[in-house]
Image (cartoon, rainbow, N blue to C red):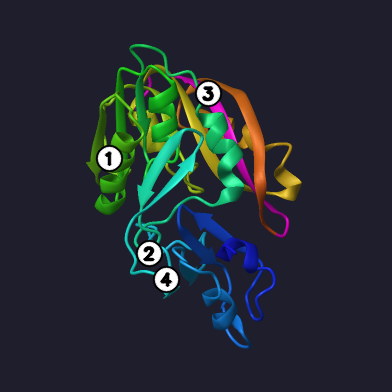
Amino acid sequence: MRVVEMLGTASGVPRKYVRYGDALVFREEIGGGGCGEGLHAGNGLQERVRHGGGEGQGGEERIPSVRRILGPGGGETVHRENGIRFVFDPERVMFSPPGNVNIRVWASRLDAWGGCTVLDMFSGIGYFTLPVAKYGDPERVIAVDINPMALDYLRKSAAASGIRTGIETVARDCRELQGIKADLILMGNFKSVAYLPAALRNMGGVARIFMHYLVDTSSLGSHATMVMGRLRSYGFVGGEELHSEVVKSFAPHLWHVAALFRVRRTTGPLP
């Protein structure tokens, strides 16, 4: 019996876990009773079991808080999703949780036409960079992340996924970027509204900006108006909401929202 079939019945083993390739990540402590005995009962067990918060973010570099508790020594795993092979070590870099799968699939349908320049300001290991590069036809893709290790895994994942579009990786704070003139800007960070000035400095005359942010229940019907008001405060006009959706509940009365806006540059000063 495989370990994933036993987890719900082994004594002391929590039922909730996330599987990334051959690694299982639990969100609560495993202990007591016959937990260890139950997990070891599988012949030829290859899964690597870890304990830790799957969505935990260790500072700006988003290093997960996990520890290995069972199975072969750590290392890389290959997680397959939407035709992409994500290569990473769950103990060293964060992978966006399963609740975000639908929005990652939706991002793969963003129109990245021939000649388009794509800028991912918070690329991580490529949750959005890789689907856009694989399923679009962009001329240039620039992936920026403050964690060089995440970019190493992005490059490995691009190669493993047969992505032929060259991806430029930049290990720095995205607020330091200037003048890229992107046509599509990806902002997979809950602080994306605060980073709008950096996005606007790096767009062409017209750009689409794909944003993620948190919205309380009372503001679910007006979050787009809030973003467009922020754009106007920076002297930009022509803001238009193209699409938005609630990804999932983040906390009581707080929601993870993803939205796509079209923004037109004005002749005024950049923020």
Q: Earlier in the sequence, mark 3 or mark 4?
A: 4
What's the residue at 42%, 63% (across, down)?
64
User: In x, y percent, where is residue 112?
Assistant: 43, 19
Q: Earlier in the sequence, mark 1 or mark 3?
A: 3
Could you say whether the residue bearing mark 2 is in a helix, strand or loop? loop
Q: Which mark is residue 109?
A: 3
| Amino acid found under the numbered disc labelled 4 | Gly
Check disc 3: other Cα within 10 Å, few if <14, some if 14-19, many if 20+: few
Check disc 4: other Cα within 10 Å, few if <14, some if 14-19, many if 20+: some
| Whether residue 110 is visible | yes
User: In x, y percent, where is residue 238?
Assistant: 53, 18
Q: What's the distance in space between the residues labelled 3 and 4, CA to CA?
A: 37 Å
Mark 1 touches mark 4? (CB < 8 Å): no
Indicate the quadrant where residue 1 lies: bottom right
Q: What's the distance in space between the residues labelled 1 and 3, CA to CA?
A: 21 Å
Q: Which residue is mark 2?
A: 91
Q: Check if residue 2 falls in the magenta segment.
A: no
Q: Residue furthest front?
A: 43
